[in-house]
Amino acid sequence: MSDQSRAELAQLLLPVIRWSPERGFADARPLIEQALGLGVGGFLLVGGEQDGVRALAKELQLKSRHPLLIAAELERGAGQQFAGATGLPPVAAITAMGDLEALRRAARLTAREARTMGVNWNLGPVCDLDLLAENPLIGSRALGNDARKVAPLVTAWIEACQAEGVLACAKHFPGIARATHDVHLEPSTVDTPADQLKELDLHPFRAAISGGVASVMTAHVAYPALDSSRVPASLSREMLQWLLRQQLKFDNLIVSDLMTLPGVWEGRDARAACVLALRAGCDVRLGPGDLGATLDALEAGLEDGTLDPERVKQSVRRRLKWAQWASPPNDWRRPSGADTAWGALLADKVLRIEHGPVPPMGSVTEVAIVDDDESVESRRVDRTGIVDAMRLAGNDARIVSAPTAASGGPLVIALFADYLPGKGRHRLHDDTVRQVRALAAQAEALQRGVVLVGLGDPRWVAQVGLTCPTIIAWSGDRVMQQAAGRGLLRKR
């Protein structure tokens, strides 16, 4: 096998660089050096601080022998991943406002902030419909549940993002709306008939393709009605070559979801899955596992005829085309002061009040935190945002484990509960429900009211069964915690 073939195969791999609060990107340095030496086609960044990300992205591009795709999942603004950037509400909260221009502006702000950090590929929008409460992954990440209404929202998001020089990514093809298992934990199969999938689930993807989306991400979910072999879409030539390429006429970049997720393994390891994904039609693979071992497996696939050399070259050309499209010049628009000010206010605008009105807070406000997401690795956000925002506004807000006599105002119960990767369920733990109800009863015994703050999808909040005044804050991200804190003090 020639060095050129190995170099071409390396371009189709995008390893993950993870930041840690304690050591920054230091622990990722050996991987970065190995990846640049092999000639990978880009990186997926998870976490970081705005200035550090900017410096790292510049370094990676300068040291690479070809333009890189620098990707990040920024569904909820650049602040979703990078400290110092603007965090935004989930798209479901924005679309609930019924303001299409707000969605465009959110996508535009996200892309502008991403570009200033050197991130040129946003792994969004989610094109999956919000069809099942039992789905453990989608929830408020979706633009809606009506395929016809979601389609123009998808188009608007993609156009706004790509107008700023950042690739968009329609995911997770052909749609994971009907999946009831979390592919971060186990394999998943959707048994819906093909005509329903094509009529509804595929409709937002058709809109994305018509809108010129740069990339489509595949689902690690099996669809027997679309491919009787029952392999996940990421490994299915039937779904990627025939359905996506031939029938839907998509000729841009196909990218896999993370190849280290158990949903794509089932009888194979990440190396074998990477070979099958390339054979099926995935141009590039995110998180391919051990780079050297995966490259060895891909080379063996070329030698034994599993992989078509011409297909590999097509994928190399597609990756290079879009990496060049996203390369500087540096004349892209930076976010203005008006952009970031608007983004900061958006979180306040999407708050929703149920069973209201919210009573006035006391001079001392006690906030009890109930965390249904505590064990989920993907949820690393601290839980102090509500009290920090209230203290900044002059209120003596305190985190407590139970209501006390120190406050005569209502007890605030902050419930963190959402659909999260790796959580694997769509119902609150029984202990969570008991804890919320016990706190409410303790407040009532002290003749105090209760205000519930739901930091997650509204369906989780409804499961506690309380009818006290409730603020729906849509997610547990710090930006939404702070908005909820301000919302508690807002004069009505």
Image (cartoon, rainbow, N blue to C red):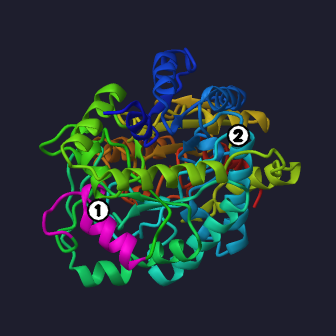
Is residue 197 visible in the rendered structure shown here? Answer: yes
Measured as percent of width and height from the top left, residue 206 is found at: 47, 77
Measured as percent of width and height from the top left, residue 15 is found at: 44, 34
Please report the residue visible at 20 percent of the width from the left and 51 percent of the height from the top. 187
Q: Nearer the viewer, residue 369 or 100?
A: 100
Q: Which residue is identified by label 1?
A: 134
Amino acid type at circle 1 is Glu
| Mark 1, secondary structure of its residue | loop
Amino acid type at circle 2 is Ala
| Left or right relative to 195: residue 385 | right
Residue 363 vs 59, above or below: the answer is: below
Q: Which of 155 and 304 is in front in this view?
A: 304
Residue 109 vs 67, above or below: the answer is: below
- Mark positioned earlier in the residue sequence (1 or 2): 2
Q: Which residue is identified by label 2?
A: 85
Q: How far apart are marks 1 and 2 (CA)?
A: 32 Å
| Left or right relative to 112: residue 311 | left
Task: State the extent of the magenta-drawn residues as a range.
Answer: 227-248
